[in-house]
Image (cartoon, grey):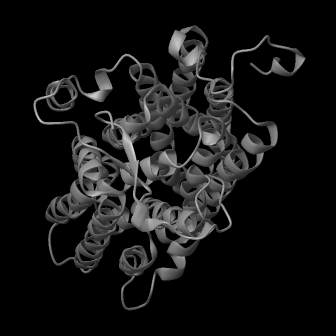
Amino acid sequence: MRPGSYQRDMSSDSPPVASGPSGLPRSTFSIIFAVSMVTAMGNTGMISVLPAIGRSIGMPDPMVAAVFSLSALLWAFSSPFWARMSDRYGRKPLMMVGLAGFMVSMAFCAVVVAAGLRHLAAPVVIFVLFLLARALFGLFGAASNPATQAYVAEHTPEAKRTQSMSGLAGAFSLGTVIGPFIAPLFVLPFLGLAGPMACFSIMAGIMLLVVWRRLPESQYRPEPPPPGSKADQEAHSGPPMWRDPRLTPFLIYGFIVAVSQTAQGQTLGFLIIDKLAMSPTAAQGFIAIAMMFGAMAGLLAQWGLIPRFEMTPRQLLRWGVAVAAIGNVIVAAAPDYWGVVAGYAISSLGFGLARPGFTVGASLAVRLEEQARAAGAIAAVNGINVVLAPAFVLLYEHVRPAPFILNAVLMVAMLVYAYRNPQLKAANPRPARVEGPDEALV
């Protein structure tokens, strides 16, 4: 077998069973889906209660947004490492590492928040401890993302990869529906605002047990190249994936899109609190409703529009940022709460199209044996963008509509980029053909 090629793991052979959207058995895809969903639930559930936590403890708004900064940097730097480890040790063990990191991090966050709400330490001390608690997620929680994406990509032919990756992305969107919705329900009398994080830690522990007992290892394993071979030298000393010209345009596009979506999500809570002129705790339910509408719009994009119209990555890259730009303009100009909700939902619909677009485009741009490394680069992009969120919150404190106007400008720039860049223009898994009337969307 040639170096870097894949071999089937015959020990996992089993009788044919019903297949999910990726070609995997439904039970297997459901477990992978749940891994992503639980992580999304916890992170977005935490984001939804952070404004209330920060203002209850006495932390300035930009400091609250900065809680995710260190973990985002660690996520970005550790994701490529975990991607290589998943090639070496398998997809399942790395999913377990990621879930364990998420579980421990959430438990630590719950303890820190409980201490802050009881004023057992100064807000600055609580902030530092919160950073460290999230750092555990950045270091170890990043392990599951490249493993899940590579697992699905390895079992999906190119023609079906947009649908399969959109189905997996739907786990994130579903998690963002459920997370903010149930987070207020976990604000328990004896734990207060620390309750959601404690409950999400327990959920991660249950999911870790499910993966350990029920998930089979991937049927395809990357065969390491012989030591000293050219392929081995490239794997260890070649340029990182983010410098690969096949991937760089997708990563640039994905970074800008992720920055805009994260900035909007982290600014939303403060905007709603100020728009309603309520206390942080009283406004929590309204924040959860807005985030739920946004997440449902993302689900509509990934489970409704993409499969219904068989949208290609090239179409997603263009339509996604165009719709997101319109939504941000609506949020910036919204006179009341429901205007904000409508604009946020439209933006989320656009982001729900754009993110599978660059994820699938990047996956199609590389070979099968490079899927985990490409997924690691994408995960790094999705993590490091959070570092810029405090700047948007600071901008919001000076001019409230400014972050959303800036987002709209960035999305228009990405629309132009999607039309002009050769790699993004060619992001289409279908065989080349003469375009007919049905290609008018392109």
Q: Is residue 248 left or right of residue 270?
A: left
Q: Position of residue 235 (x, y in %)?
A: 21, 31
Q: Position of residue 345 (x, y in %)?
A: 68, 47
Can you say which quadrant of the picture contains the N terminus?
top left
Task: Judge by depth and name the residue closer to the eye, 405 or 426.
Answer: 426
Task: Judge by depth and name the residue closer to the eye, 120 or 73.
Answer: 73
Residue at 44%, 87% (x, y): give it: 188
Residue at 42%, 61% (x, y): give it: 10
Q: Is residue 295 above or below residue 226?
A: below
Q: Is residue 433 above or below residue 121?
A: above
Q: Position of residue 285 (x, y in %)?
A: 59, 69
Q: Is residue 88 left or right of residue 289?
A: left
Residue placed furthest toward the left: 228
Task: Judge by depth and name the residue closer to the eye, 37 or 287.
Answer: 37
User: Could one spot residue 283 in this view of the protein?
Assistant: no
Q: Is residue 46 left or right of residue 114?
A: right
Q: Is residue 66 left or right of residue 260?
A: left
Q: Position of residue 255 (x, y in %)?
A: 42, 31
Q: Which of the 4 image quadrants contains residue 104?
A: bottom left
User: Could one spot residue 170 in this view of the protein?
Assistant: yes
